[in-house]
Image (cartoon, grey):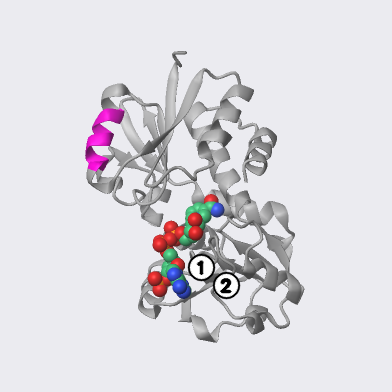
Amino acid sequence: MCMNKTYGILAHPVAHSLSPQMQSAAFVERGIDAQFLRFDVQPADLANFLSRVRAEHINGLAVSLPHKEAIIPLLDEITQTARKIGAVNTVFWKENSLMGDNTDAEGFMRAVMEHTAWSREHARSVAVIGAGGAARAIIFALKEKGYEVTIFNRTVSTAKKLAEEFHAFSQPLEGFLAREFSLVVNSTSVGLQTDVSPVSVSSWDGFSGTAFDAIFDPIKTRFLQDAESAGGKIVTGENMLLFQGVRQFQIWTGLSAPEDVMRKTVNNNM
Ligand SMILES: NC(=O)c1ccc[n+]([C@@H]2O[C@H](COP(=O)([O-])OP(=O)(O)OC[C@H]3O[C@@H](n4cnc5c(N)ncnc54)[C@H](OP(=O)(O)O)[C@@H]3O)[C@@H](O)[C@H]2O)c1
Protein backbone atom coordinates (compact mmCIF):
# COMPACT_ATOMS: atom_id res chain seq x y z
CA MET A 1 0.00 0.00 0.00
CA CYS A 2 1.43 3.43 -0.95
CA MET A 3 0.95 5.99 1.77
CA ASN A 4 0.50 9.64 0.98
CA LYS A 5 2.74 10.97 3.73
CA THR A 6 5.75 9.62 5.59
CA TYR A 7 6.86 10.44 9.11
CA GLY A 8 9.23 8.59 11.39
CA ILE A 9 11.35 8.32 14.50
CA LEU A 10 15.07 8.99 13.95
CA ALA A 11 17.24 7.30 16.60
CA HIS A 12 19.93 4.70 17.21
CA PRO A 13 18.90 2.21 18.44
CA VAL A 14 15.24 2.71 17.59
CA ALA A 15 13.55 -0.66 18.15
CA HIS A 16 12.26 0.19 21.66
CA SER A 17 10.48 3.42 20.65
CA LEU A 18 6.72 3.62 21.19
CA SER A 19 6.33 6.64 18.87
CA PRO A 20 5.43 4.52 15.79
CA GLN A 21 2.49 2.85 17.53
CA MET A 22 1.34 6.09 19.20
CA GLN A 23 1.52 8.30 16.09
CA SER A 24 0.16 5.64 13.71
CA ALA A 25 -2.90 5.24 15.93
CA ALA A 26 -3.37 9.02 15.89
CA PHE A 27 -3.15 9.14 12.07
CA VAL A 28 -5.78 6.41 11.75
CA GLU A 29 -8.07 8.13 14.27
CA ARG A 30 -7.88 11.43 12.37
CA GLY A 31 -8.23 9.74 8.95
CA ILE A 32 -4.76 10.82 7.76
CA ASP A 33 -3.18 8.72 5.01
CA ALA A 34 0.32 8.47 6.49
CA GLN A 35 2.89 5.96 7.64
CA PHE A 36 5.21 6.35 10.62
CA LEU A 37 8.53 4.51 10.19
CA ARG A 38 11.57 3.67 12.32
CA PHE A 39 14.77 5.23 10.96
CA ASP A 40 17.73 3.57 12.67
CA VAL A 41 20.59 5.90 11.73
CA GLN A 42 24.17 5.76 13.05
CA PRO A 43 25.69 9.12 14.04
CA ALA A 44 28.13 8.97 11.10
CA ASP A 45 25.20 8.63 8.66
CA LEU A 46 23.11 11.52 10.00
CA ALA A 47 24.05 14.09 7.32
CA ASN A 48 23.29 11.59 4.53
CA PHE A 49 19.98 10.77 6.14
CA LEU A 50 19.01 14.46 6.27
CA SER A 51 19.79 14.71 2.54
CA ARG A 52 17.35 11.84 2.03
CA VAL A 53 14.71 13.62 4.13
CA ARG A 54 15.05 16.64 1.84
CA ALA A 55 15.19 14.64 -1.41
CA GLU A 56 12.19 12.44 -0.55
CA HIS A 57 10.42 15.24 1.30
CA ILE A 58 9.80 13.07 4.36
CA ASN A 59 7.06 15.02 6.12
CA GLY A 60 8.27 15.00 9.70
CA LEU A 61 10.55 13.33 12.23
CA ALA A 62 10.56 12.60 15.91
CA VAL A 63 14.22 12.73 16.98
CA SER A 64 15.73 10.78 19.84
CA LEU A 65 19.15 9.74 21.17
CA PRO A 66 21.85 10.23 20.01
CA HIS A 67 20.79 12.79 17.39
CA LYS A 68 18.97 15.52 19.32
CA GLU A 69 21.91 17.95 19.33
CA ALA A 70 23.84 16.79 16.26
CA ILE A 71 20.86 17.41 13.98
CA ILE A 72 20.72 21.15 14.73
CA PRO A 73 23.34 22.36 12.18
CA LEU A 74 21.74 20.15 9.52
CA LEU A 75 18.39 21.99 9.71
CA ASP A 76 17.45 25.34 8.13
CA GLU A 77 16.08 26.86 11.31
CA ILE A 78 15.15 25.93 14.87
CA THR A 79 12.57 27.45 17.21
CA GLN A 80 13.54 29.61 20.15
CA THR A 81 12.50 26.78 22.50
CA ALA A 82 14.80 24.31 20.78
CA ARG A 83 17.62 26.85 20.80
CA LYS A 84 17.30 27.50 24.52
CA ILE A 85 17.09 23.78 25.35
CA GLY A 86 19.92 23.08 22.92
CA ALA A 87 18.20 20.04 21.44
CA VAL A 88 15.64 19.15 18.76
CA ASN A 89 13.13 16.32 19.17
CA THR A 90 10.79 17.31 16.33
CA VAL A 91 11.50 18.07 12.67
CA PHE A 92 8.86 19.56 10.38
CA TRP A 93 8.57 21.54 7.16
CA LYS A 94 7.66 25.23 7.08
CA GLU A 95 7.16 25.94 3.40
CA ASN A 96 10.54 24.87 1.95
CA SER A 97 12.52 25.08 5.18
CA LEU A 98 13.34 22.10 7.37
CA MET A 99 12.61 23.23 10.92
CA GLY A 100 13.51 21.88 14.38
CA ASP A 101 11.47 22.22 17.56
CA ASN A 102 11.47 20.64 21.01
CA THR A 103 8.26 19.30 22.58
CA ASP A 104 9.88 17.55 25.59
CA ALA A 105 9.49 20.66 27.78
CA GLU A 106 5.76 20.92 27.10
CA GLY A 107 5.39 17.16 27.46
CA PHE A 108 6.96 17.24 30.91
CA MET A 109 4.94 20.24 32.07
CA ARG A 110 1.60 18.78 30.99
CA ALA A 111 2.52 15.45 32.59
CA VAL A 112 3.08 16.91 36.04
CA MET A 113 0.37 19.58 35.83
CA GLU A 114 -2.42 17.29 34.65
CA HIS A 115 -1.70 14.39 36.95
CA THR A 116 -1.36 16.15 40.28
CA ALA A 117 -2.44 19.32 41.98
CA TRP A 118 1.27 20.06 42.30
CA SER A 119 1.19 23.42 40.49
CA ARG A 120 -1.41 24.67 42.94
CA GLU A 121 0.50 23.48 45.98
CA HIS A 122 2.20 25.88 48.36
CA ALA A 123 5.86 25.76 47.43
CA ARG A 124 7.33 26.50 44.03
CA SER A 125 10.62 24.80 44.69
CA VAL A 126 11.71 21.91 42.45
CA ALA A 127 14.62 19.47 42.61
CA VAL A 128 15.89 18.04 39.32
CA ILE A 129 18.16 15.00 39.69
CA GLY A 130 20.41 14.77 36.64
CA ALA A 131 21.90 17.29 34.23
CA GLY A 132 21.75 15.64 30.79
CA GLY A 133 19.51 16.20 27.77
CA ALA A 134 16.20 15.42 29.48
CA ALA A 135 17.15 17.70 32.36
CA ARG A 136 17.73 20.60 29.96
CA ALA A 137 14.16 20.41 28.60
CA ILE A 138 12.67 19.93 32.07
CA ILE A 139 14.62 22.81 33.64
CA PHE A 140 13.77 25.07 30.69
CA ALA A 141 10.05 24.30 31.18
CA LEU A 142 10.17 24.94 34.93
CA LYS A 143 12.09 28.21 34.63
CA GLU A 144 9.70 29.45 31.93
CA LYS A 145 6.90 29.04 34.48
CA GLY A 146 8.88 30.80 37.20
CA TYR A 147 9.75 27.87 39.45
CA GLU A 148 12.86 27.81 41.61
CA VAL A 149 15.02 24.88 40.49
CA THR A 150 17.88 23.10 42.27
CA ILE A 151 19.92 20.66 40.16
CA PHE A 152 21.52 17.61 41.80
CA ASN A 153 23.95 15.65 39.65
CA ARG A 154 26.62 13.00 40.07
CA THR A 155 29.08 15.20 38.17
CA VAL A 156 28.88 18.46 40.10
CA SER A 157 30.61 20.57 37.42
CA THR A 158 27.88 19.68 34.87
CA ALA A 159 25.15 20.68 37.32
CA LYS A 160 26.93 23.97 38.04
CA LYS A 161 27.24 24.83 34.36
CA LEU A 162 23.57 24.05 33.75
CA ALA A 163 22.53 26.05 36.81
CA GLU A 164 24.41 29.09 35.53
CA GLU A 165 22.82 28.79 32.10
CA PHE A 166 19.25 28.50 33.40
CA HIS A 167 19.54 30.69 36.52
CA ALA A 168 19.01 27.71 38.79
CA PHE A 169 20.87 26.41 41.86
CA SER A 170 23.08 23.33 42.05
CA GLN A 171 24.04 21.01 44.90
CA PRO A 172 25.95 17.72 45.18
CA LEU A 173 23.73 14.64 44.84
CA GLU A 174 24.82 13.33 48.28
CA GLY A 175 23.13 16.31 50.02
CA PHE A 176 19.68 15.72 48.44
CA LEU A 177 16.70 15.86 50.86
CA ALA A 178 13.32 15.42 49.17
CA ARG A 179 11.24 17.12 51.87
CA GLU A 180 12.78 20.50 50.97
CA PHE A 181 10.95 20.42 47.61
CA SER A 182 7.35 20.31 46.39
CA LEU A 183 8.35 18.49 43.19
CA VAL A 184 11.28 16.09 42.71
CA VAL A 185 12.21 14.96 39.18
CA ASN A 186 14.46 12.10 38.13
CA SER A 187 15.99 12.95 34.77
CA THR A 188 18.94 10.56 35.05
CA SER A 189 19.05 7.21 33.29
CA VAL A 190 19.43 5.45 36.68
CA GLY A 191 16.56 3.02 37.14
CA LEU A 192 16.06 2.28 33.45
CA GLN A 193 15.30 -1.45 33.29
CA THR A 194 16.83 -1.90 36.76
CA ASP A 195 15.54 -1.68 40.32
CA VAL A 196 17.86 1.11 41.50
CA SER A 197 17.40 4.80 42.30
CA PRO A 198 19.79 7.73 41.90
CA VAL A 199 18.96 8.81 45.49
CA SER A 200 18.95 6.90 48.80
CA VAL A 201 15.70 5.67 50.33
CA SER A 202 16.36 7.76 53.46
CA SER A 203 16.48 10.96 51.40
CA TRP A 204 12.68 10.64 51.03
CA ASP A 205 11.97 10.83 54.78
CA GLY A 206 9.17 13.31 55.47
CA PHE A 207 8.38 13.87 51.76
CA SER A 208 4.80 14.92 50.99
CA GLY A 209 5.20 16.49 47.54
CA THR A 210 5.11 15.05 44.01
CA ALA A 211 7.78 12.89 42.37
CA PHE A 212 8.16 12.47 38.60
CA ASP A 213 10.46 10.06 36.77
CA ALA A 214 11.26 10.58 33.06
CA ILE A 215 11.99 6.83 32.83
CA PHE A 216 8.98 4.68 31.87
CA ASP A 217 10.57 1.23 31.74
CA PRO A 218 9.62 0.09 34.33
CA ILE A 219 6.56 2.29 34.80
CA LYS A 220 6.96 2.48 38.56
CA THR A 221 10.69 2.89 39.07
CA ARG A 222 12.48 2.36 42.38
CA PHE A 223 12.69 6.20 42.59
CA LEU A 224 8.87 6.48 42.40
CA GLN A 225 8.29 3.52 44.71
CA ASP A 226 10.46 5.12 47.40
CA ALA A 227 8.75 8.51 46.96
CA GLU A 228 5.31 6.89 47.25
CA SER A 229 6.26 4.81 50.30
CA ALA A 230 7.40 8.00 52.04
CA GLY A 231 3.97 9.59 51.44
CA GLY A 232 4.45 11.47 48.16
CA LYS A 233 2.28 11.56 45.03
CA ILE A 234 3.83 10.17 41.84
CA VAL A 235 3.64 10.85 38.10
CA THR A 236 5.02 8.19 35.76
CA GLY A 237 7.24 8.87 32.73
CA GLU A 238 4.95 7.62 29.95
CA ASN A 239 2.84 10.76 30.55
CA MET A 240 5.73 12.89 29.29
CA LEU A 241 6.16 10.60 26.30
CA LEU A 242 2.44 10.95 25.54
CA PHE A 243 2.26 14.74 25.80
CA GLN A 244 5.46 15.41 23.85
CA GLY A 245 3.96 13.17 21.14
CA VAL A 246 0.62 15.00 21.29
CA ARG A 247 2.40 18.28 20.56
CA GLN A 248 4.40 16.65 17.73
CA PHE A 249 1.18 15.44 16.10
CA GLN A 250 -0.24 18.98 16.25
CA ILE A 251 2.94 20.45 14.72
CA TRP A 252 2.98 17.93 11.86
CA THR A 253 -0.72 17.94 10.99
CA GLY A 254 -2.12 21.24 12.27
CA LEU A 255 -4.90 19.16 13.87
CA SER A 256 -5.76 18.51 17.50
CA ALA A 257 -4.30 15.20 18.62
CA PRO A 258 -6.58 12.29 19.65
CA GLU A 259 -5.08 12.12 23.14
CA ASP A 260 -7.27 9.29 24.44
CA VAL A 261 -6.35 7.01 21.53
CA MET A 262 -2.68 7.89 21.88
CA ARG A 263 -2.73 7.24 25.63
CA LYS A 264 -4.47 3.88 25.16
CA THR A 265 -1.93 2.88 22.52
CA VAL A 266 1.00 3.80 24.75
CA ASN A 267 -0.48 1.91 27.70
CA ASN A 268 -1.25 -1.16 25.57
CA ASN A 269 2.33 -1.26 24.29
CA MET A 270 4.17 -0.80 27.59
N1 LIG B 1 9.56 10.26 29.30
C1 LIG B 1 10.09 10.86 28.25
O1 LIG B 1 9.39 11.31 27.35
C2 LIG B 1 11.59 11.03 28.19
C3 LIG B 1 12.14 12.01 27.35
C4 LIG B 1 13.53 12.16 27.32
C5 LIG B 1 14.33 11.31 28.10
N2 LIG B 1 13.75 10.35 28.89
C6 LIG B 1 14.59 9.48 29.73
O2 LIG B 1 15.41 10.28 30.56
C7 LIG B 1 16.60 9.58 30.87
C8 LIG B 1 17.82 10.48 30.71
O3 LIG B 1 17.96 10.82 29.34
P1 LIG B 1 19.03 11.92 28.86
O4 LIG B 1 18.82 12.09 27.41
O5 LIG B 1 18.98 13.12 29.73
O6 LIG B 1 20.42 11.15 29.13
P2 LIG B 1 21.86 11.81 29.27
O7 LIG B 1 21.94 13.12 28.54
O8 LIG B 1 22.81 10.73 28.92
O9 LIG B 1 22.00 12.16 30.85
C9 LIG B 1 22.13 11.16 31.78
C10 LIG B 1 22.10 11.74 33.21
O10 LIG B 1 22.08 10.62 34.12
C11 LIG B 1 23.17 10.75 35.03
N3 LIG B 1 23.69 9.42 35.36
C12 LIG B 1 23.98 8.41 34.50
N4 LIG B 1 24.42 7.34 35.19
C13 LIG B 1 24.42 7.69 36.50
C14 LIG B 1 24.76 7.00 37.71
N5 LIG B 1 25.18 5.74 37.69
N6 LIG B 1 24.60 7.65 38.89
C15 LIG B 1 24.15 8.93 38.93
N7 LIG B 1 23.81 9.64 37.81
C16 LIG B 1 23.95 9.01 36.62
C17 LIG B 1 24.22 11.57 34.32
O11 LIG B 1 25.07 12.16 35.28
P3 LIG B 1 26.58 12.62 34.91
O12 LIG B 1 26.47 14.03 34.39
O13 LIG B 1 27.29 12.54 36.22
O14 LIG B 1 27.11 11.64 33.89
C18 LIG B 1 23.31 12.59 33.58
O15 LIG B 1 22.93 13.61 34.46
C19 LIG B 1 16.65 8.35 29.94
O16 LIG B 1 16.34 7.20 30.70
C20 LIG B 1 15.56 8.63 28.93
O17 LIG B 1 14.95 7.44 28.49
C21 LIG B 1 12.41 10.21 28.93
Residue at disc 2, secondary structure: loop
Provide residue 56's location: percent of width, then percent of height. Answer: 30, 22
Magenta-drawn segment: 45-53
**Front one among 98 and 199:** 199
Q: Amino acid at mark 1?
A: Val
Q: Position of residue 128 (x, y in %)?
A: 53, 69
**Nearer to me, 137 or 15:** 15
In the image, residue 105 above or below residue 10: below
Residue denoted by label 1:
190
Which residue is denoted by mark 2 in the rendering? 197
Drawn side of residue 137 relative to residue 233, left or right: left
Quarter of the rendering containing residue 204: bottom right
Do the residues under discs 2 and 1 have CB atoms within 8 angstroms? yes
Q: From the Cβ of disc 1, is ligand 1 less than 8 Å away?
A: yes
x 39%, y 47%: residue: 13
Residue 2: give its label. none
- Label 1 sits on a secondary structure element that is loop
Q: In front here: 196 or 165?
A: 196
Instruction: Farthest residue to the bottom: give it.
Output: 175
Q: Which residue shows up at 74% across the image and 76% down it? A: 230
Residue 21 in percent (x, y) is at 56, 34
* Mark 2 to mark 1 CA distance (whole Å): 6 Å
The furthest residue to the top: 1
Relative to 71, 126 lies left or right: right
| Relative to 16, 80 lies left or right | left
